[in-house]
Amino acid sequence: MIHFFGSLAWWEILLMLIGVIAIFDVLLELFSTFGDHTKKRSVTENHPVDSEEFIQAIARLSNSPIEQGEDVKILNNGDEFLAALLGAIGNARQTINFTTYIWEEGVMSKAIFVALLERAKAGVEVRLLLDGFGGFFASYKRMGRLKLAGGRVKHFRLARFGKLSRLHRRNHRRAIVIDGKIGFTGGMAVADHWLGNARNEKEWRDMMFEVRGHMAKSLQAAFAQLWATTNGEILEGSKFYPTFSPAEQTGPLCKYVSIASSPASDTQPLTKFFWLSIASARKKIYLNSSYVVPDDHIRHALMDRARAGVDVRLLLPNNKTDAKPIRLASHYYFEKYLKAGVKIYEYQPTMIHSKIIIIDDIWSVIGSSNMGIRSVELNEENVLGINNPRFAQELGAVFLKDQQKAQQITLKQWEKRGPLERLGEMLFVRFIKQY
């Protein structure tokens, strides 16, 4: 080894050293949270979620305006979502904008493709934005047919020289908007495990949400932002952002905040949004997410609220998860959660992929984001924070119904887990930034 280095010129050794430092820096960026956070997060005044001060604080923190929207419709599992989606696409008259993370070939993708193709042939402007990773295996032939019919298909961040440093930062948003009037967001994407009604292990448990009016326009903005980034076309005009008359309003208005989070911003609004929402709870926090490996601040907020007497419940996947390393990483924190009074439940029938938070039966969070560092710091995500007691109570009832199909994890039971599982937890938690 000494002989090898001795045969090199000084500038060759310098280049090798620069390369080693660069590789080490990339590994830190991808897999470590070193240097990412302040040691402690606090708020000078903590307002309850039913107060005007709370939603004003959320809006200021996320740099997002407070909007007024209508009721939200819960769509449980693929049977309800696909029927609603195909109906909305079939009634499209001007525009269909569609972005999701996963697009896999199968029965579901074929049904959606046929509907999009028919509308494109009828003169509707169809735009489909697929993630360069999650939509990589979408049928090239079918996408070509959609383009020939007038549709436009783009991929977000395909692997390209000169852009590889951002390749791990994916588009995880769910924003499907029809004529600027009807929108869909939530946990589902396009693959056959999202079909059915969670009747067996092949049919995932998940939720999507149908929104109208101003909330649909908020989803449109989340789509349009990435569409402009991908191909330069800025979407504007009434066919994308229509005006609504009082006669078109389908229910009482509620206040909401829409956040389209991007890793381009070091301010990371989504993690602060989640933290303040959780820290403001006075009675209950119901959190259901497919992958729960949050940063230190959110973990401590959950435990602090539990110690303060708040009913904190986490509803998570069991071993039927599609991502066992992430499950093991989340297990690393279970003992601390349980000792703090957090209640943990693992859903048993099938993989549960829903992404919801309900706080004090007033404040609800829905959208594309998981409760993990990847979602809040690396992915493109979009969520809606909704101040609507009726919707929060309806969503809470769905949570409790799913909880009935879950097994509660107790501290006594958890302390008996084996050494191999403990070893797996310690191993996979090292990669927490990628979950």
Image (tube, rainbow, N blue to C red):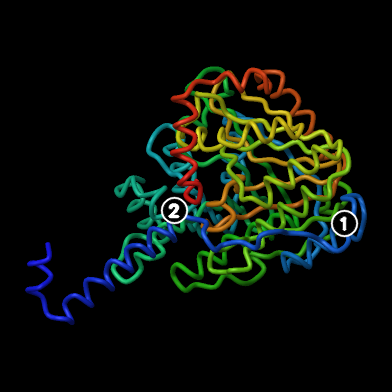
Residue 28 is situated, as x and y percent measured from the top left of the image, at: 42, 59
Q: Total number of numbered labels?
A: 2
Q: Which residue sits at x=71%, y=36%?
A: 74
Residue 208 versus residue 143 in the image, above or below: above
- Verify CB contact (< 8 Å) between mark 2 and mark 1: no
Residue of label 2:
31
- Is 276 displayed left or right of 227 in the figure? right
Closer to us: 18 or 321: 18
- Is 360 displayed left or right of 243 in the figure? right
Q: Which residue sits at x=33%, y=68%?
A: 22
Closer to us: 283 or 252: 283
Q: Which residue sits at x=62%, y=31%?
A: 316
Residue 314 versus residue 213 in the image, above or below: above
* Type of amino acid under label 1: Asn
Residue 98 versus residue 198 in the image, above or below: below
Residue 159 is situated, as x and y percent measured from the top left of the image, at: 32, 60
Instruction: Tell me if mark 2 has few (under 14), some (14-19) or many (20+) residues whose alpha carbon lies within 10 angstroms of its own.
Output: some
* Type of amino acid under label 2: Phe
Residue 237 is situated, as x and y percent measured from the top left of the image, at: 64, 71
Residue 310 is situated, as x and y percent measured from the top left of the image, at: 84, 37
Residue 352 versus residue 227 in the image, above or below: above
- Dot 2 falls on a residue whose secondary structure is helix
- Is 282 displayed left or right of 349 in the figure? right
Residue of label 1:
46
Quadrant housing the N terminus: bottom left
